[in-house]
Each structure stands twice: as structure tokens, then as C-alpha cells.
């Protein structure tokens, strides 16, 4: 199964998802930097990287949706749907997180907790995305399935 949203044969969605993932993980790192030092610059950086991650995730969602709509295997569709729903839930969580940080008061425990939950959910979502690529061969060129996609058809050795 090749991806529908690609540039010169390279899938767009996997290229774009690195931005929100990196920004959200770094936002969490900055939260801990703020906790350890109390310096406002850490909280400010966490705020802006959180917002940048939201924008990046919404941009990555467009080619991801195009790829989802192009799937024909019902098992791959189901995994892709879970992947999409989880990612949309993460974006909603991070949008709430961003909104909570707009005030003038110091960074509270709730936004940090949301960041931790969101990054943990990103790990689960990344696993689902990897499953789509490595098991179902979603981004394989020319519609060739990944070799692992046919594990259930392996002949027993005699």
C-alpha cells in the first residue's frame, strides 16, 4: 500500500509528524527546566514549543487523513483510525494545556501533568503509526506490502 500524500515518492505525513513530536517533548523538558531552576525563560519556551507543536500536528493531520482515506485493508484502516483518534485527542489535550498557560500565574501542576499524559499518548500513537508502516506496509513504494504484512501466511519449515 503506497501512501497517497507524497512528494517525489516520499510520504509527507511521517516527515511532518517529527515537528509536533519534537516540540511537545521539548516543551515537557522545558517544564522540568522551569521546575528545577524557577527561571521564567523555561516556562516561556515551553509555552511557545507547545503552541508550535499544535500547529505542526494540525499540518501533519491533513496528509495523514489523505493516507487514511486511501487505505483498503480493513485491518490497516482500523489501526489507522485508532492512530488518528488518539492523535486528535492529544491535540485537544495540548490545546487545553496551551490555554491553561496563557495566564500570568506561574506554571501549575495541571499543565505539566497534561504534558506528561500527552507525551505518553504520543508513544502509543507512534507505535500504532509504526505498526501501519512496518506491518501493513502503508508507505511502501508501488503498493508493495511490507514483508512482515504476510507473517500469518508463512509456511511451516519441515
Image (cartoon, rainbow, N blue to C red):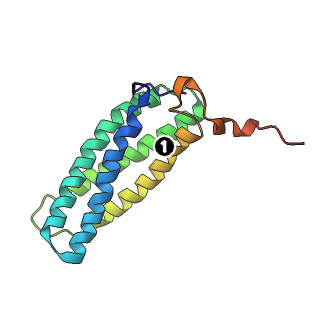
**Taking the image as drawn, is residue 109 in sight?**
no
Count of numbered marks: 1
- Tell me where residue 38 sits by quadrant: bottom left
Where residue 98 appears, as percent x and y from the top left, is 21, 55
Residue at 32% across, 66% down: 113
Quick one: which residue is furthest to the left in this view? Answer: 104
Kind of element beneath mark 1: helix
Query: Considering depth in this image, is 141 or 152 the residue closer to the camera?
Result: 141
Specify whether 81 is left or right of 49: right
Q: Nearer the viewer, residue 119 or 145?
A: 145
Residue in front for this viewpoint, 92 or 57: 57
Q: Is residue 122 above or below residue 42?
A: above
Looking at this view, is 116 or 1 the one in front?
Answer: 1
Q: Identify the residue shown where x is 58% and y is 29%.
A: 73
- Quarter of the picture holding the N terminus: top right
In the rendered image, the vertical position of residue 27 relative to residue 37, given as above or below: above
Residue 66 drawn at (x, y percent): 40, 28
Q: Which quadrant holds the C terminus?
A: top right
Crowding around mark 1 (Cα neighbors within 10 Å: few <14, some 14 to 19, many 20+) is: some
Residue ranking furthest to the front = 8
117 displayed left or right of 130: left
The residue shown at (44%, 24%) is: 4
Could you tell me residue 104's position as x and y percent? 9, 64
Query: Which residue bears the numbered disc 1?
Result: 129
Left or right of 106 in this view: 117: right
Please provide percent x and percent y for residue 44: 15, 61
In terms of image quadrants, where is residue 74? top right
Residue at left offset 27%, top offset 48%: 53
Q: Is residue 23 visible?
A: yes
Q: Is residue 28 above or below residue 138?
A: below
Amino acid at each position: 500500500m503506497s501512501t497517497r500524500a507524497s512528494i517525489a515518492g516520499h510520504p509527507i505525513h511521517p516527515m511532518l509528524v517529527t515537528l509536533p513530536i519534537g516540540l511537545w517533548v521539548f516543551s515537557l523538558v522545558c517544564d522540568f527546566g522551569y521546575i528545577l531552576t524557577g527561571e521564567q525563560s523555561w516556562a516561556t519556551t515551553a509555552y511557545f514549543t507547545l503552541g508550535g507543536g499544535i500547529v505542526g500536528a494540525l499540518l501533519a493531520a491533513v496528509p495523514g487523513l489523505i493516507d487514511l482515506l486511501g487505505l483498503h485493508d480493513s485491518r490497516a484502516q482500523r489501526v489507522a483510525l485508532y492512530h488518528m483518534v488518539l492523535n486528535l485527542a492529544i491535540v485537544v489535550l495540548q490545546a487545553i494545556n496551551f490555554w491553561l498557560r496563557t495566564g500570568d500565574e506561574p506554571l501549575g501542576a495541571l499543565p505539566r501533568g497534561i504534558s506528561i499524559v500527552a507525551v505518553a499518548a504520543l508513544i502509543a500513537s507512534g507505535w500504532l503509526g509504526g505498526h501501519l508502516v512496518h506491518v501493513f506496509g502503508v508507505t511502501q513504494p508501488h503498493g508493495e506490502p511490507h514483508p512482515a504484512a504476510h507473517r500469518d501466511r508463512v509456511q511451516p519449515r519441515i
